[in-house]
Image (cartoon, rainbow, N blue to C red):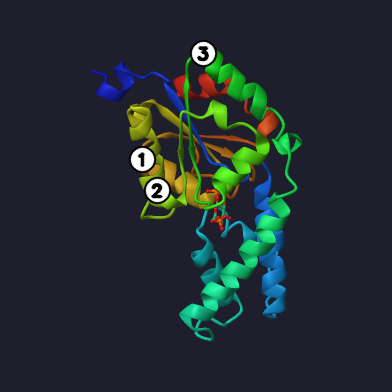
Amino acid sequence: MKGFDEMNKELKAIIFDLDGVITDTAEHHFIAWKQLAEELGIAIDRTFNEQLKGVSRMESLERILALGGQADRYTTEEKEALAYKKNEHYKQLIARMTPDDILPGILDLLRELKRNHIKIGLASASKNAFTVIERLQIGEYFDTIVDAANVKHSKPHPEIFLTAAEQLSVHPSMCVGVEDAQAGVAAMKAAHMFAIGVGDREALKEADYIVETTKDLTYDAIVRAFYRE
Ligand code: B16
Ligand code: MG
C-alpha cells in the first residue's frame, strides 16, 4: 500500500537558494573571501570554497581561519571587523549587478512556474539577499523570501527551507528545493524535500537530481524528475 506522501505526490512549490542558483554571487563571495584571506596570509582555492557555499558569514570566516591555523588568533570583536570588511567588499561587487546577471534559464523557469501556478520561495543564508533580488529586479516572482534575518539556524539545518514551505502553506513533501551548495542540499534533505543540485556532481551527490548548469533547469525536467522519484 502506498504511503501518504506517495498518494498525494504533487509538485506545489519550488524553493530556490539565491547565491549560485539565481545568480552567480557565489563567485562574488569567493572573490571577497579570497582577498580577505590573502590579507591574513591564508590561500583559499575553489575546492575549499565549496565548503563556504551556503554557510553563514561568521562560520565562513571561522573555516578560513581554521584552514590557516589561525582559529585562536583573533578576539570576537576582531573577527566581526574582518567579517565586516569582507562584506563591504562584497557589497561593492553586488552594487554593480543588473538583471543581466540572472543565470541562464532562470527567468524562463520563473515565468513557467507562474504560468503553472507553482508557488515560488527563496531560502537564502545571505543577509544581502533582498539587495541582490532588488538589483536583479525579480522580487515580483517570489511568494516568500526567507533570509538569514528570519532564521536561527544556518544550513545544513532544515529551518530555512521548512520556514519557506510553511510561509507558502505547502507540505515539504510537495516542495522542490534548488541548491548549489553541499550544506544546502543537506538542509533540503533534512527538510524532506525533493532536492535538486546545480553544479558539481561530486560535491552535490546527496541531491535527488543534479544538473550541471541552470540552463538545464527547465520546468519539464523538474516535473519529470519529481514524479519519477
Ligand atoms: P552574507 P545562499 C549564502 O547564500 C552564500 O552561499 C554564502 O557563501 C554566504 O556566506 C552566506 O550566504 C552569507 O551571506 O555574508 O551576504 O550574509 O547561497 O544561501 O543564498
Ligand atoms: Mg548558494
> Looking at the image, can residue 12 be seen?
yes
In the displayed structure image, the side of residue 166 where residue 117 appears, left or right: right
* Quadrant placement of the N terminus: top left
The residue depicted at 41 percent of the width and 41 percent of the height is: 161
Which of the marked residues, 2 or 1, is nearer the chain's N terminus?
Answer: 2
Can residue 212 be seen here?
Answer: no
**Which disc is residue 42 wearing?**
none
> Which comes before the other along the chain, label 1 or label 3?
3
Q: Mark 3 points at which residue?
A: 116
The image shows residue 212 at horizontal and vertical percentages of: 67, 37
Pointer 1 residue: 163
Q: What residue type is labelled 1?
A: Thr
Asked if residue 44 lies left or right of residue 73, the reply is right
Label 2 element class: helix
Question: Disc 2 or 3, which lies upstream in sequence?
Answer: 3
How many residues crowd around disc 3 within 10 Å: few (fewer than 14), some, or many (20 or more)? few
Residues under numbered marks 2 and 1 in contact, where contact means CB atoms less than 8 Å apart: yes
Looking at the image, which is closer to me, 61 or 78?
78
Q: Is residue 213 left or right of residue 191?
A: right
